[in-house]
Amino acid sequence: MLLPWGARGLGQWLVVADPMEPARAIVVLSGRAPFRAMEAAAIYRAGWAPEIWLTAEARTPEEVALDRLGIQVVRGEVYNREVLERLGVPARAIRVLSGGVWNTVDEVRLVARELGAGGADRVILVASKTHSRRVRATWSAVAGPSSRAIVRYAREEPFDTEQWWRHTRDALQVSWEVFGLMNVWAGFPLQPDRQRR
């Protein structure tokens, strides 16, 4: 009886959303296309920020191998741009931040640097439901107090907060995020293998 209650609570605990405030930009964190971009478009249309920033992931060993085979790889930021434009965001309001990112820490550092370079102090970060708490924790650990992140999750993304352990995809997401949070709290001892190409 205690296990289902604790498990249900874990799924709900991972999902966080900060109150909305006007910001310099809305950032679609990489992964889970099209849901994050869909949420960013809704936030943009509501007038909370004048731009949407996309991050570009570093090329994975799989992508390098596909390139060598002459197979075209479509990157997540390409899909996200298409989703945003299809949902009415003008191309001039979409910006892909330069620099390939390997993980959430890289994304937060890149966004914080861009935010500081523009003299702004607030950004809206759009993540998946399960990723939202780790994004908030990572921003606090990495970006510091000089800027603020408003963390929002993709509302249309499928995730069962009540019985996530019954579905493989949900269970994998929860496991990934719990281990990711432990890495944040431990000071990021686990790092991506940036040499693997």
Image: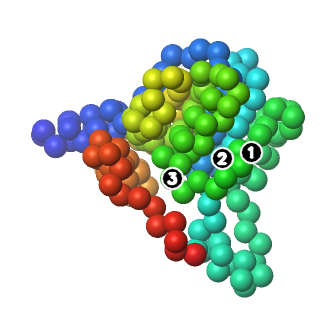
Q: Nearer the viewer, residue 137 or 132?
A: 137
**Which residue lies at the image location 48% right of the left edge and 46% below the top edge?**
105
Q: Are marks 2 and 1 in contact (CB under 8 Å)?
A: yes
Which of the two labelled residues, at mark 3 and mark 1, occupies the earlier sequence position? 1
Tell me how far mark 3 sits from mark 1, CA to CA: 16 Å
> Which label number is shown at residue 103?
3
Which of the two labelled residues, at mark 2 and mark 3, occupies the earlier sequence position? 2
Badge 2 amino acid: Thr
Badge 1 amino acid: Val
Q: Quadrant of the C terminus?
A: bottom right
- Residue 172 percent coordinates (x, y): 38, 56
Within the image, what quadrant is residue 86 found in? top right
- Residue 118 percent coordinates (x, y): 70, 27
Badge 3 amino acid: Asn
Within the image, what quadrant is residue 145 found in? top left
- Residue 174, visible in the rendered structure: no
- Residue 19, visible in the rendered structure: yes
Determine whether the residue tagged by mark 1 lies in a helix, strand or loop.
strand
In the image, is 14 to the left or to the right of 103? left
Rendered image coloring scheme: rainbow
In the rendered image, the vertical position of residue 112 relative to residue 121, given as above or below: below
**Which residue lies at the image location 48% right of the left edge and 33% below the top edge?**
143
- Residue 160 percent coordinates (x, y): 41, 41
Q: Which residue is mark 1?
A: 96
Tell me how far mark 2 sits from mark 3, CA to CA: 10 Å
> Which label number is shown at residue 55?
2
